[in-house]
Every structure is written in structure tokens, then in C-alpha cells.
Image: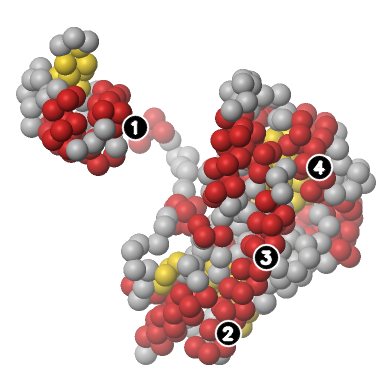
Amino acid sequence: MGTLADRLRAEVGRLRAGERLPSSRTLVERHRVSPVTVSRALGLLAAEGLVVTRPGSGTFAAERPAPAPGGADLGWQSVALGERSVDAAGVTWLLTPAPDGVIPLSGGYLHPSLQPLRALAAAGARAARRPDAWETPPLNGLAGLRTWFARSAGGDLTASDVLITSGGQQALTSTLRALLRPGAPLLVESPTYLGVLAIARANGLQPVPVPADAEGVRPDLLAEAFAMTGARVFYCQPTFSNPSGARMPAERRAQVIAVARAAGAFVIEDDFARHLAIDTAPAAMINHDLDGRVVYVAPMTKATSASMRIAGVIARGPVAERIRAVQMVEGFFPARPLQETLLELVSSPGWPRHLRAVRTALKSRRDALCAALARHLPEVRYHRPSGGPHMWVRLPDGIDDVALAESALRAGVLVSAGRPFFPAEPPAPHLRLSFACATSEAEIAEGVRRLAGAIARARA
């Protein structure tokens, strides 16, 4: 349909307002498409205001407003908008697909061959056949889906603790708005997820870095940061952190909660990669929480598809009611068909098979990346992740990681510079290499070979 719509759009552009388009029968014969395709293409053009349809008479080119002389003057908007700005550049970079011929070693989603696309299609078809699929869902989310999120998180959590939201990014936005006023400090691991930095800055919050090591945030420095800033919220990804891949051990999780308790603060646990474990995923941090200290966010896009914009938020006490209220004000509720589809998927026998296949594939791809780094870039250092889609690579001193990422793209491999993942100045140059979005192990090896060439040229 898109191709026919493009052709008709160009044809309409050559007509004067009021001129008639060929009949639907003529368009079917001329373009060798079905009547349904013609009808949809004309409907799209009508929605764009390019044509008008008159029953019994045909379809005609619509009136087009004359362009303002010299173009519209929009400069006044700079004054009206004020000083506040929203910078989506970092998030846009991560969501932009690699150009043709470029190997993707950057990206947060599974390669399509690893996504449960057929299972999702089947689940969506089953969900759509139910008469109530398009009715208003329960405002907290479907009961069966909330029960599943509670069981996935573990412990003594129940469906009543769960709120279904429209994806992880929206869940984090609602949670931060519920917990913090504009101008407040937000403690984050350093390095940390680009998306949470974008949300914080767009909402007037002040991200404060707390250094992390191979086991996650350092509790001693977290206590210092709470004392120095008076912060009331700490954000972290204790399971296969993005970008570092760090996995926080149980003892440190308990220490982090104890530090937050002493500071009278909340902990936001972003458990985005639980279903991408290569080894066994540890128990969620919320299972160490006895007094409603942890707000748990569990997105489902990483293990399914980027368009499965569903997440679970688990919170207890007054904070849960506030997060629910913020979501209601911002977006009412997530689309019921998506909730029904996800519930069908995770309740099917194919879901555990999918997770086993993903675990096997991620292990093979991670090992391929390690082997390629050992072969082509033995001078770099990295932590071997036990889950998640990312590897955090420490570059030799003196290399500009941002310039290197741009040079690597010209060499045919897409990587993420480490600098944007730090809320403040980075201590050293890094790259984030993603091993889940490439086509195969061979492509990963070729991508590292191209990256090695870019590094060699940067040092020349």
C-alpha cells in the first residue's frame, strides 16, 4: 500500500485543485493491485488532506493553501518556549537502526531472528478474537498480567502491588514525576542508562553520579552522595546494568537498601534485563525490601519486541498510589490489546522455550564477541557479562571515544561511545558494544575487525 500511496501522492501533486483522479477500476488495472489496496491508499491520501472523495462522482485533488511569501516566521516561538529544552539526541541515537552495510554493535533490542515474532503474532490473534479485547481494561492493568509480574519478581509480592504501564520509559517517567519535584537531585549509578538521564533532565531533575564497579554501585560512595546532596531517590539497574553489564551480588543489594533506609530515601530498581540472563539471574532487589523502600520497574520490550510497550511497576504504600495517580493523569492506561497479547504470550508453552533459545543465543554471541576482542583488540579491557545484551569496553588512554564511534561508523560498524552514559565527566574512555542486535557471530567478529581498524587509524 505504501508504494501505491507514494505513486498517487506524486500524481496528485501534478493535478490542479478539483481535478479528478482516475477511477478505482483504472488504478487497479494500471498499478496491478487489488481494489482493497487502492481503497486504502486513497484513504491515506484523504487523511493527509491531499484528496477529497465525493460519493458517486469520484476522487479529486484537494485545495492546497498558498504558501506564505518567504515562508512562515516561527522565530517568536523561541521566546515563548523559554530556556527549558528537551534533548533526545542520545536516546534517538540508540533507537536509530544501522545504515545499510553497517554492522550493528549498538542497540538495546534483540535481533529480529531472536524475537518471538511468530509467537507474538499468534498471541495477538488469539487476544483479538476475544469480544472484550478493545474494552477499557482495569485501570491498574489486567489481573492475570499483574499476577504474572508479581510472580516473576518473586518473594511475597502480589497482583495488588503491580501497576501495568506503557513500557519501561513511561514507567520511569511516571515514577520520577511521582517521587521528585523539578530541581531535585537524583542519584544514579555512573555510568548509567541514557534513557533515565534524558527523562531526568527533561523534567528538571539534577542527575548526580555515584561511581560503580564490576558489582554495581559502591554502597560507601552512595551513603556519601545521600549525605552531601540530601537526595531522596537512587536509580539503579542491579541486574546486568546498561551499559556496564554489572550484576550486583545479594550482599551488596542488601547494603544499598540499608543505605537508602538510613537516608530516608527510595530506590528505583530497573530490572530491564531479567529475562536476558545467560547465567541464572539473581533475586530482584525488591525481595530484600521490608518497608516499601524499592520501586521495581520491569519492562518487557528487551525480551520480546521494541513495540511491546508494556512494563510492570511494583510499589507498596503511599508511593504506589502516587505513581498510579501520575499515570492516570498522563496516559490513563496502556492499550488493552497489548496487555492481552503479552498475557497470552507469557502464559503459553512457547514462552519458556523462547527464553531458553535467547539464553543460548546470547551466550554464543557474547563468547564470539570476547573471542573477537582477544583476536583483534587484545589491549582493551572488559567485564564478561553474565546476562543482558551489552559489554562495557575500556579503551586505552588517549583515545577519544566519541570521535572513535564516528570513525567506526564510517568504517562500517555502529558502536556507542561511553561518554554520554556518564552524568558528569567520564573517568576514562569506554565503548558499549551490544552483542544481541547483530545478525550472527560471524557478523560480530567482522564488526570487531572493522572497529580495530578504526582504532588503529585513530592512533596513527
Element marked by disc 2? helix
Q: Which residue carries the number 3 mark?
A: 359
Q: Is residue 184 visible?
A: no
Residue under circle 1? 77
Task: Say what secondary structure mark 4 lies in.
Answer: helix
Classify 343 as above or below 395: above
Mark earlier in primary sequence (2, 3):
3
* Secondary structure beneath label 3: helix
The amino acid pointed to by label 1 is Gln
The disc at residue 150 is 4
Q: Are marks 1 and 4 in contact (CB under 8 Å)?
A: no
Amino acid at circle 3: Arg
Q: Residue at x 62, y 68 (%)?
A: 362
Q: Gap in Å between the C-alphas at discs 4 and 2?
A: 38 Å
Instruction: Point out the frontmost of discs 1 and 4.
Output: 4
Specify which label sits upstream in the sequence, 3 or 4.
4
The quadrant where residue 247 appears: bottom right
In the image, what residue type sits under mark 2? Ala
User: How is the structure coloured here?
Assistant: secondary structure
The quarter of the picture where residue 170 lies is top right
Instruction: Give the left or right position of residue 243, taking residue 440 as reference.
Output: right
Q: Which residue is drawn at the image coordinates 54% and 42% (left, top)? A: 121
The tag earlier along the polypeptide, 1 or 3, is 1
Residue 158, given in percent of the width and then of the height, sits at 86, 38
**Residue 88 left/right relative to 137:** left
Q: Residue furthest top?
A: 56
Q: Is residue 439 left or right of residue 360?
A: left
